[in-house]
Amino acid sequence: DGGITQSPKYLFRKEGQNVTLSCEQNLNHDAMYWYRQDPGQGLRLIYYSQIVNDFQKGDIAEGYSVSREKKESFPLTVTSAQKNPTAFYLCASSPQPTGGFGYTFGSGTRLTVV
Amino acid sequence: KNEVEQSPQNLTAQEGEFITINCSYSVGISALHWLQQHPGGGIVSLFMLSSGKKKHGRLIATINIQEKHSSLHITASHPRDSAVYICAGNMDSNYQLIWGAGTKLIIKP
């Protein structure tokens, strides 16, 4: 079955370390997205990519980096510059950048900084 | 003011009750998603709708684009329905998603 795979489900990192969250889709979707969720708030857009080798900053890109070398993969790196990295991270994809045919969502990664 | 408002923020009900969760938005959207997030965080897409009503099992979602309002109903609620329910809209202007803060539902046996 087609879908989005995020790994790992839970991730712990020491303060000051970079960590990369994986997001892989086998839906042949052009666009991919990363969101962050904090308690009591709606999800916020970190980065998105509409085509391979291209990506744009979302609302809260500071302290994060991404790459889109393959259509299937859109990894997110949480760098040591991110002040409050502990959060739930959600990856999504859509067939077209407009999202007009809907989104498919991963199951998320919960990152905890210890 | 958030562009997407969900109500209530928290809802506790007894097993078997009919549940309604509301989502209102202040911007133009082309479609609205309802998602379910269980404890531990995993998110499941329930519905995407742009008009009318959709039904899946005991779940029903409705939307009125003109009134900028959507509802998610759960009939014959069960403790396994306990989760956070989130609505998100496809914005007309840039096709990005705007998210509600979620409604935490607890169904007691």
Image (cartoon, grey):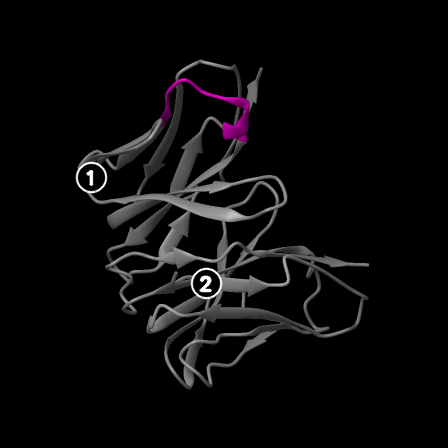
Q: Where residue B58 appears, x then y in whole percent?
A: 35, 26
Q: Picture coordinates of residue B82 (x, y %)?
A: 54, 29
Residue A59 appears in the rendering: no
Residue A102 left/right relative to B66: right
- Judge whether residue A38 can be spotted in this image: yes
Query: Where's the C terminus of chain A, which quadrant?
Result: bottom right
* Direction from residue B45 to residue A17 in the image, left or right: right
Q: Which residues are magenta?
A: B73-82
Q: Does B31 appear above or below A17?
A: above
| Residue nearest the viewer, comparing B69 with B2 | B69
Q: What's under tag 1, amino acid-wise?
A: Ile
Query: Whole-Å distance between the Cαs marked 2 and 1?
Result: 29 Å
* Residue A41 spot, x, y in % from top left: 54, 45
Q: Residue at x 25, y 37 (%)?
A: B68
Residue A4, numbered label: 2
For the view shown, which residue lies furthest in the front direction? A1
Which labelled disc corresponds to residue B65?
1
In front: mark 2 or mark 1? 2
Q: Residue at x 46, y 81 (%)?
A: A68
Q: Is residue A89 above or below residue B8?
A: below
Q: Chain of mark 2?
A: A
For residue B92: magenta? no
Q: Chain of mark 1?
A: B
> Is B71 placed above or below A16 here?
above
Asked if residue A39 is positioned above or below residue B74 in the image, the reply reads below
**What kind of residue is marked 2?**
Ile
